[in-house]
Amino acid sequence: MSNVSQFHSKERIQEQACLWISRMDRGLSAVEKQELTIWINQHKIHHKTLLEMASYWDDLSVLNELSGLFPLEQSPKKSNNKVYRFAVAASFVLFSLLGTNFIVNNSYNPFNEHQHLVQTQTFKTKLGQQASFSMSDGTSIQLNTNSIVSVAYTPDHRQITLVRGEARFDVAKDKSRPFTVTAGEQSFTALGTIFNVQKNNEQGMELVVTEGKVLITQATESLENLTEAFKHPSADKFSGTLVVSGEKATITEGVTTPVNKISLDQVQRDLAWQQGILIFDGEPLEQVLQEVSRYTATKFQISDPSLNQLKVAGYFKAGDIDGLLASLNSNFNIDIIRTTDNTIHLASVNF
């Protein structure tokens, strides 16, 4: 067995720490907790860097996750018990200070020379809410209903995790720092591009590119390889699916289906949520109700199975349940029954 350990640069360790904090924000699995503990124990600089990066994070859940993980570290020898207790106590003091908006002195800032490049943050929208956010590099992110993204910018890379929902990314150009969105088991990497990612589940996504190009890879692909891919896009050693402006890619069960060129009308329908509206063009009623349900806590039940395949077309304001129901009633003679548990039953009048 080799006793040689790989040396990572300071920038690489900072990047790894940011990624771990991003993962903690969306919640660590049992396996990830073990992996993080191993990483922390590899070198004291990992521990130190993780705490430094945590000082930039706004969400206290990350600090709670960290404080819960430190007891998992292996206890040092008895002779070092006092030192160990002091280190752990110091860590908890730091957590407490951060929890009361303690301001870290700039002399402890590892990115002091490149402060404008650093950003770690979480953005969320509630059910039925849409919002836009600006990044430190000029990139803008627009979130659809019930969505969460976490941001981990470092001097070398811009890492976004789409934890849940749907988002539009208008990426500022920076050839030295690719922009990667990780969603479930997939990653979407760009330099200066406008694209939309909808996460249906861990293995199902939809990507629409409206400007530039996006490279789809597995989420396990290293950031170094992604950076290299954009420096040398013809490299044979790198595999992935390239999606360009006006194209749509669908990932089902972790497999990317053939990329399709879509019409301007289709692009407008897919991205109409960005103007707060939903456009349907002959979709089955069952599919329409699934889409509408993303914007409201109201539940729909179709009592008459024959209604499932009715074709629906029209423009609807996102979250406008009454407008949709009125249209269904007048166009298809559908009976609407509301119950006290916020459920709406749909049936044919003669059902």
Image (tube, rainbow, N blue to C red):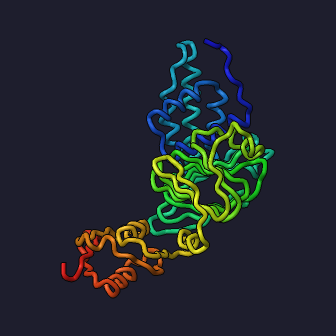
Compared across the picture, whether 148 is left or right of 330 comes to right
**Going by the picture, which residue comes out furthest to the bottom?**
330
Residue 149 vs 345, above or below: the answer is: above
**Going by the picture, which residue comes out furthest to the left?**
351
Residue in the picture at 77% in, 43% down: 232
Residue closer to the observer: 251 or 147:
251
Q: Quadrant of residue 140?
A: bottom right
Compared across the picture, whether 226 is left or right of 198 comes to right
Residue 87 vs 198, above or below: the answer is: above
Residue closer to the observer: 271 or 40:
271
Residue 257, image x and y in percent? 53, 53
Is residue 97 shown to the viewer in this render? Answer: no
Residue in the picture at 31% in, 70% down: 308
Report the quarter where the C terminus lies.
Answer: bottom left
Residue 164 vs 9, above or below: the answer is: below
Residue 304, image x and y in percent? 23, 72
Residue 109 vs 196, above or below: the answer is: above
Q: Quadrant of residue 194?
A: bottom right
Residue closer to the observer: 334 or 108:
334
Residue 252, image x and y in percent? 47, 51
Report the quarter where the N terminus lies.
Answer: top right
Residue in the picture at 42% in, 72% down: 283
